[in-house]
Amino acid sequence: MTALGFSLFQLFFQLQPCFAVTGYQANMLYADLMASYNERVRPVQNQDQELTVSAAFNLISILELEESIQKLSIYGYFMLSWKDEFLVWNASQYGGLYSVEFPEDEVWKPVVVLSNGYGGFNVLGENFVKVTVKNNGTATWNPGDVFESTCFIDITYYPFDTQVCELHFSIWSQGMDEVKMKPIFPDIVKSDFQENGEWRLLEAWMRTDETYSRSNIIISLKVQRRPKFFILESLIPIVLLSLLNTFVFLIPYHSGEKISFSVTVYVAYGVYLSNVSSSLPHNSLHISALTVYLICMLTLSVIATFFVALETRYFFSIKEQLSEAAAKDVYNNHNDEKHIYNDSSARIRTNHLWTNLKKMNVTLFWIFIVADFGVSIGFFLYLRNQA
Ligand SMILES: *[C@@H]1O[C@H](CO)[C@@H](O)[C@H](O)[C@H]1NC(C)=O
Ligand SMILES: *[C@@H]1O[C@H](CO)[C@@H](O)[C@H](O)[C@H]1NC(C)=O
């Protein structure tokens, strides 16, 4: 629209010098130009010659990049120009009218199709977009749209990932020898660009790829995820959860909460795992490091639960032995003094078991702290190498 407004402004400006164009002259010009014009004919005098369409692309915004369905949506418009050899006139014969506009279906225009579109073919053009033609035959056409393309997303380094997405625009139904599209300059115009909250645009460029049978222009966008939201929403809670995994060894046995505590930690990991995997593409080509990390943490939490179960079992068997010893104690006090020696040896034995259990608990606590931190630090180093 801005481009359209701009060309209207240009038109108005060019009407200004010395004498005004009358409506009659403008009508005459349209009638004369259209008298023998056929919009189906490629606008070159020598039909063996190819027609070159110069293209620039103005990117207005990246609407979204949905990783779970691998779809990129952008908003922008093309600035296409070519020379229409049938729309040439002597401006001074028409009162100095240098530029006219045609509805896009009344003059020849290239059929440009987004060939890797997400929901089928996307043909450039809207009824309201006009083709502006200068008196020397230069035609400009600025069709814009929301373009949705498929984009293969590699989520290995999620949420510190960088993606490159391509949009393939081809000249449909006309061969390379008839119509050729070429970029005016390799950069994408970003004068109207509005930032996206989730993705930072690192680079945007366009090129042609001669290996295709159709003339085409490939627009590539390199975007980087802004990770702050995911760090706050997923990473920090997951790392905190790994601390919780070790705290199970600090809970006293007789509270009877150890097992339920470590199972709760396991369930919490499961919830995060399903949360993360629901926002990632469901394919097996790339597995995100975050998923692997979560599975490692899940495994650690299962191992912790196993040791806690062993410890609890051990604890209750010591308790049983103690109560047996206590029962013996009562019995011995009632009978002869000779057995006191045996009785104290049982007590020494259970005391020994207690210390073993405590030692085992402290050792497990440190082992799990080292394992949890080791896995977490390894995960972050792996991600940082890429970021
Ligand atoms: C355009 O028309 C004017 C007036 O009729 C004439 O003087 C001039 O030579 C023409 N120019 C061309 C390039 O034909
Ligand atoms: C046609 O005229 C415009 C200015 O009015 C100029 O920018 C353009 O280069 C010209 N094109 C050709 C093919 O002469």
Image (spheres, rainbow, N blue to C red):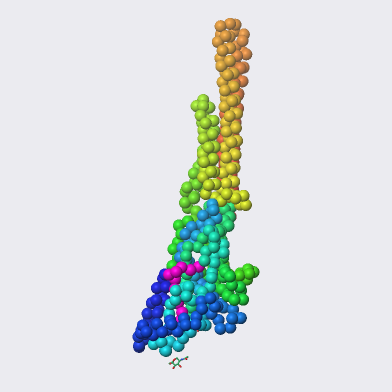
Residue 13 rendering spot, x and y as whole percentages: 37, 81
Give me the residue at 57% from left, 46% from top: 291
> Which is more toward the observer, 13 or 382?
13
Residue 85 rendering spot, x and y as whole percentages: 52, 82
Residue 297 rendering spot, x and y as whole percentages: 57, 41
Q: Is residue 387 visible?
A: no
Give me the residue at 61% from left, 13% from top: 341
Locate residue 294: give its quadrant. top right
Locate residue 342: give its quadrant. top right
> Which is more toward the observer, 81 or 313?
81
> Which is more toward the observer, 32 or 260?
32
The quadrant in which the C terminus is found is bottom right
Residue 305 rendering spot, x and y as whole percentages: 57, 33
> Is 41 placed above or below 118 here?
below
The quadrant in which the N terminus is found is bottom left
Is residue 37 one of those drawn in magenta? no
Which segment did they paint magenta? Answer: 124-134
> Is 189 placed above or below 71 here?
below
> Is 89 placed above or below 144 here?
below
Question: Is residue 1 rendered to the left or right of residue 164?
Answer: left
Q: Is residue 18 visible?
A: yes
> Is 180 placed above or below 69 here?
below
Give me the residue at 45% from left, 57% from top: 197
Question: Is residue 9 rendered to the left or right of residue 170?
Answer: left
Q: Which residue extends farthest front?
A: 35
Q: Which residue extends farthest right?
A: 211
Question: Is residue 77 rendered to the left or right of residue 338?
Answer: left
